[in-house]
Amino acid sequence: MQLIPTSLKDVAVLEPKVFGDDRGFFLEAYNEATFKTLGLPTRFVQDNHSGSRKGVLRGLHYQLRQPQGKLVRTIRGEIFDVAVDLRRDSAQFGQWFGLVLSAANRRSLWVPPGFGHGFLVLSEFAEVLYKATAFYAPAFERSILWNDPAIGIEWPLDGEPTLSEKDKAGSSLADAETYPDSSEL
């Protein structure tokens, strides 16, 4: 597995070694020893699986307590996946990184605790898997507006996305409760 650094400190793209022949393919999506060698977390407590149709935008989500690191990959279709630095003491606070994750490219994105996460479905349908380092805690979940100009994410959109009520009511970055001290993450 290859770790590819991104423009955001601590966010990384993971590219697996894919072994294929006329029968199909095999890859390791997670290996504790490899992750330890790469300096990534090795303890995940929850696996999540979502399916969404084209134009659905989920996020930007984060948890104030029990902040989750997420290892995200797509097993069907294609998404534009985004991480936003929400650590107020970070020199990159409010900056974002995005890339296409797809069943075809088989890449994963590591989104550390302290970052908001969201994705837009680009294909007709997409299934997304992600491992989380902390349990889902709905009382502590927050959402930042997907189109906040202070962040300026360049979503590859044709028209308006389909949003949940929670995401429609998200906060601006300026008004959001975020992580004041990244040493607590």
Image (spheres, rainbow, N blue to C red):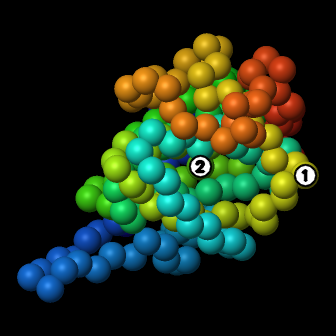
Q: Which amino acid does the dot numbered 2 rest on?
A: Val
Residue 142 % position (x, y): 80, 40
Q: Say which of 155 and 151 sits in front.
A: 155
Toward which corner of the image does residue 69 lie, by quadrant? bottom right
Residue type marked 1? Ala
Q: Badge 2: how crowded within 10 Å, few (<14), some, or many (20+)?
A: many
Measure the alpha-carbon separation of dots 2 and 1. 21 Å
Residue furthest out toward the bottom: 23
Please tell me whether mark 1 sits on a helix, a strand or a loop: helix
Q: Which residue is mark 2?
A: 111
Residue 95 x, y percent position in the rendering: 59, 25
Q: Position of residue 91 (x, y in %)?
A: 67, 24
Q: Is residue 142 left or right of residue 12?
A: right
Mark 2 / mark 1, whichever is N-terminal: 2
Where residue 50 sits, quadrant-wise, is bottom right
Q: Are marks 2 and 1 in contact (CB under 8 Å)?
A: no
Image point (49%, 73%), residue name? 30
Q: Nearer the viewer, mark 2 or mark 1?
A: 1
Percent x, y of residue 103: 32, 61
Q: Which mark is residue 139?
A: 1
Relative side of 156 to 68, left or right: left
Outermost residue toward the left in this view:
22
The answer to whether residue 166 is above or below residue 102 is above
Residue at x-position 37% and y-position 42%: 122
User: In front: 94, or 23?
Assistant: 23
In this rendering, the count of numbered labels is 2
The quadrant of the image that shows the N terminus is bottom left
Q: Which residue shows up at 59% across the image and 22% down it?
A: 147
Q: Which quadrant of the structure image shows residue 170?
A: top right
Vertical comparison of 93 with 56: above or below: above
At a point 41% along the width and 56% down the height, the residue shown is 126
